Image (cartoon, grey):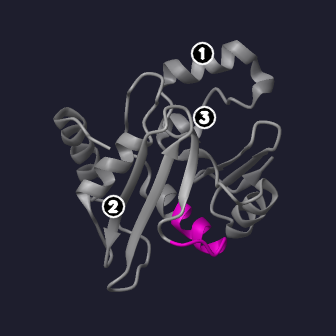
Amino acid sequence: MKLSRRALIGGAIAGGTALAFPLPAMAVGTEWRLAIRNMHNNETVDAVFARSGAFVPEGLAELNHGLRDWRTGQATAMDRKLLALLVRLREKLDLTDGTTIGLISGYRSPATNAALRSAGGAHTGVASQSQHMLGKATDIMVPGVSLDRLHGAALALGGGGVGYYPRDGFVHVDTGRVRHW
């Protein structure tokens, strides 16, 4: 994937902000990598975002861009705990570092969130104060992994909110308070 200079600079600034916060415990010599594919526009990102307990600004920038609101192009600094949670989820499923996670939704701008909520009403599952708008949530699927298995692994981690949407083909994970629906 080619990133524009503007996207990389914006992501680096957002990633730099994240560098001010501590990284969850990580062994020396360990890398945290995420590979994602946006299911709407088919864009892919495969980036190392942490190495030996330190964030990798370029990797954070790539992930922030890849997890952006695909409808508006707006990006934000994604919660580093969310990125770590996705790595832990992949590990819980016994999948390799290079396993691609299918992204249904990452960051959602307030405008996108409001539009989705009004289009389907409150019953759609789109919260008015969605964790997506804070860069703390993703809706995902993993090719070759059943949604039941993905859902069970996410619940077992106890890392935040977990929503199960089998009709829509995804599981929601966030770093808000622990809850499930």
Q: Which of marks 2 and 1 is in front?
A: 1
Name the residue tied to disc 3.
130
Which is more N-terminal, label 2 or label 3? 2
The residue under label 3 is which amino acid type?
Ser
Which stretch did the figure color magenta? 85-96
Name the residue tied to disc 1.
115
Q: Measure the alpha-carbon separation of dots 3 and 2.
A: 22 Å
The residue under label 2 is which amino acid type?
Phe
* Mark 1 element type: helix
User: Relative to the observer, which residue lies in front, 37 or 139?
Assistant: 37
Looking at the image, is 12 positioned above or below residue 178? Answer: above
Q: Measure the alpha-carbon separation of dots 2 and 1.
A: 32 Å
Q: Which of marks 1 and 3 is in front?
A: 1
The picture places residue 132, in percent across and down from the top left corner, at: 55, 38
The picture places residue 67, in percent across and down from the top left corner, at: 45, 42
Q: Is residue 77 visible?
A: no
Looking at the image, is 166 positioned above or below residue 148? Answer: above
Q: What's the mark number on residue 94?
A: none
Looking at the image, is 60 positioned above or below residue 132? Answer: below
Which is more N-terminal, label 1 or label 2? 2
Image marks 3 and 2: residues in contact by CB distance under 8 Å: no
